[in-house]
Amino acid sequence: MTRYVVIGNGVAGVTAAQAIAQSQPGADLHVYAAEPYPYYRRPQLPDYIAGLVTEDDITYRPPQWYAERGIQVHLNCPVVELDAAAYRLRLADGTDVPYDRLLLAMGGVAWMPPVEGVDRRGVFTLRTLDDARTIRAWARESRQAVVVGGGLLGLETARALRALGLEVTVLEVAPYLMPRQLDREGAAVLEILIHRMGIRTETGVVTEAVLGDSAVRAVRLKDGREFPADLVVFSAGIRPEVTLARQAGLVVNRGVVVDKYLQTSAPDIYAAGDVAEANGIVYGIVPAAIEQARVAAANLVSPGSAVYRGTIPTTTLKVVGAELTSIGECVMEADDLVQLRRADPQQGRYRKLAMRDGRIVGAILLNEREHTSAIRQLLERGTDVSAYTDLLLEENPDWKRLLA
């Protein structure tokens, strides 16, 4: 019987394990997780810090769900060595684990930039449930917080700390907030919403040092300004967890390099999710992790049976209480792109459509939920909408007319 092993129990690892179990009932299927917790929803960690959800709320499935499907989950079992030639793993406790086919789904790790003083007490990153527990406990004794990083996670963390009553400042090195999902105009609308919550933002700034004795007392910028803080969270992005792959001699660039079948440079080893680099891209988004996991699972069971063709970058999320959807080439600036915009800052609404050759190739929709489905369909169909640019910017377009 083929022995399937998955390293990592995040969204990619668990999705792949489920797909393998569905196609191969009774398979010899094992998932090894470094953390002591079953799969939980990482995007909800800020809500956990704010006290809006419990640990049970963010735990996706109960233990019996895995048992019923024959998925043997080994928690608190970090893998420290991979011998690709011998088809063997070694766990931190020295146990050797054989495999026939292996999926790397270790995800990513929070990146701590090389800033002076980040080793002081009261300085954190947020990636795991343990991180969230520690931040939540420290926040109870804090009054002022600084979040370094104005991306999605940074803003959600700021919102959580503000909900706990702290004074919060967000520092972002880019010229505006959420540069991966928003353009400058959309970010300006979002910033109004953030300021209404009592969160201060500073963009286009470089964090130079964390000040204090043993514990943090302030953050200093390169321009000399200081922001008092007794709690600092760095939200400077995620890096693929490639330590094990490098040790094993697999080809690694930013992530573990995979082919169209999501196979790595070693036979019978595949990769999916935040750890994988497909077509030169580390997507770092949940939709890509799920799509890659399903393709990788199909090829683990039947090599060469499924091809990964890439993922249209699509992010739908709640950020500081607003609903944001970003699709495709939403933040690109190019001569061949036509940009259509409609903004209502006071209502916190923003709509941007990027068009190429008369077809929508990207969109930013902030608090425009009622229009999201139609715009997504037009993009996916490649519909020529060049004759309807005025209609696209109406407050309530007649989408049926375009989708007919």
Image (cartoon, rainbow, N blue to C red):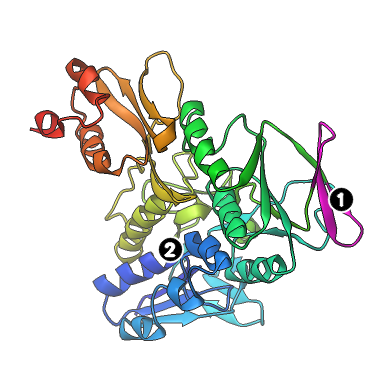
In the rendered structure, which segment of residues is drawn in magenta? Answer: 210-227
| Residue under label 2 | 11
User: Disc 1 vs disc 2: Cβ atoms closer than 8 Å?
Assistant: no
User: Residue at point 89% right, 55% down?
Assistant: 212
Q: Residues within 10 Å of mark 2 (few under 14, many from 20)?
A: many
Say if 29 sits above or below 225 in the image: below
- Quadrant containing the C terminus in the rendered view: top left
**Amino acid, disc 1:** Leu
Instruction: Find numbered disc 1 in the image and state the secondary structure of the residue it sits on.
Output: strand
In the rendered structure, does residue 346 fall within the stretch colored magenta?
no
Is residue 221 or residue 305 the one in the foreground? 221
Instruction: Find numbered disc 2 in the image and state the secondary structure of the residue it sits on.
Output: helix
Question: Where is residue 95 drawn, in percent x and y?
Answer: 61, 83
Q: Is residue 96 visible?
A: yes
Say if 94 sits above or below 194 in the image: below
The image quadrant of residue 67 is bottom left
Question: Where is residue 293 drawn, in percent x and y?
Answer: 38, 59
> Residue 93 bears which disc, if any?
none
| Residue under label 1 | 211
Give whichever of discs 1 and 2 has the lower sequence position. Answer: 2
**Amino acid, disc 2:** Val
Horizontal side, residue 245 vs residue 145: left or right: left
